[in-house]
Image (cartoon, rainbow, N blue to C red):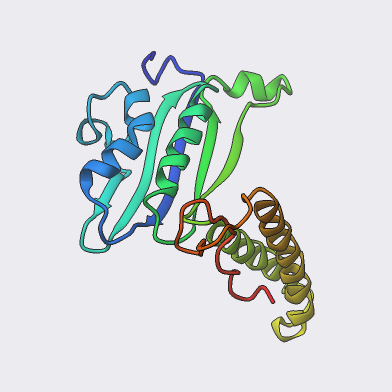
Amino acid sequence: MSSSYEAPFEIHVHGDVPLRADVQYEQIQDALKPLWKYAGARSLADGAGSVYEEEPGIQFHTEKHLLQMCWTVGGDEDFRQSLDDMCMSLNELAEQGAAIEVTFYDAQYDEEDEDAGRDSRDDFVMLFVGPTPAAIMQVQRDLLVQDVVHLMERHFDGAELGGVVGEIDKLFSQRFDDLVSSLELGKPPRGPGSGPGNPGHGGGGRRPRHLH
């Protein structure tokens, strides 16, 4: 990969992911391989540092079972595939749902472009990881409620917004039920002796809290 000053984007990855208590450093290194390998490193320890010294980079807090990312790398649009691969791996290690913010800053955009009225190629992506679809939906729901309440509190008292939050929950409940239905349709017929603990038994898991 070309060095950061030649790359068309500076890409910032930011998020905290709670991990299962049994997760070891080697598993984190393997899950994050798409990131540190993209940065041209040979290991997580080698690639955990951000291009900006003031950023903490990628840190695994063993005692808290927490992965923290505040990490910038130079790159191009192909970094999106690395992000997809990372999320798939982190799903297997996550204790609960979490959001990861990724910002693409147009490194080649300058004052001349701005003066000429040209738009930058900046982009923002919100990614979600979690052990189950329900855990991911929970994070999506909580973030949406937070954003909507923050916006509407400019005009209404927070106590007046219970109905709005309820409608958001209805939308996510329907999405969750649709997901469970699709998984039920994809399950093989249950034969004698089959049960929840047997291989092949699918399902969407526990319904997220608040989604009634």
Q: How many marks?
A: 0
Name the residue located 73 percent from the left edge and 57 percent from the top edge.
Answer: 178
Residue 14 spot, x, y in % from top left: 44, 46
Q: Along the line of sight, which residue is nearer the eye, 79 or 109?
A: 79
Q: Answer with left or right where residue 18 lies relative to residue 122.
A: left
Q: Is residue 173 left or right of residue 41?
A: right
- Residue farthest bottom in this picture: 159
Rendering coords of residue 180 (x, y %): 66, 59
| Residue 170 on image: x %, y % | 76, 70
Q: Residue at x 55, y 57 (%)?
A: 136
Query: From the image, which quarter does the N terminus lie in?
Result: top left
Foreground pick, 119 / 116: 119
Which residue is painted at 75% across and 76% down in the image? 166
Q: Quadrant of the C terminus?
A: bottom right
User: Eyeballing the image, is 103 above or below 211?
Assistant: above
110 left or right, relative to 55: right
Identify which residue is drawn at 21% across, 63% down.
Answer: 63
Residue 159 falls in image quadrant: bottom right
Q: Nearer the viewer, residue 181 or 67?
A: 181
From the viewer's perspective, is residue 153 above or below residue 12? below
Answer with the quarter of the image where residue 21 lies. Answer: bottom left
Where 34 sits versus 23, above or below? above
Q: Residue 204: percent from the left, percent from the top?
A: 59, 59
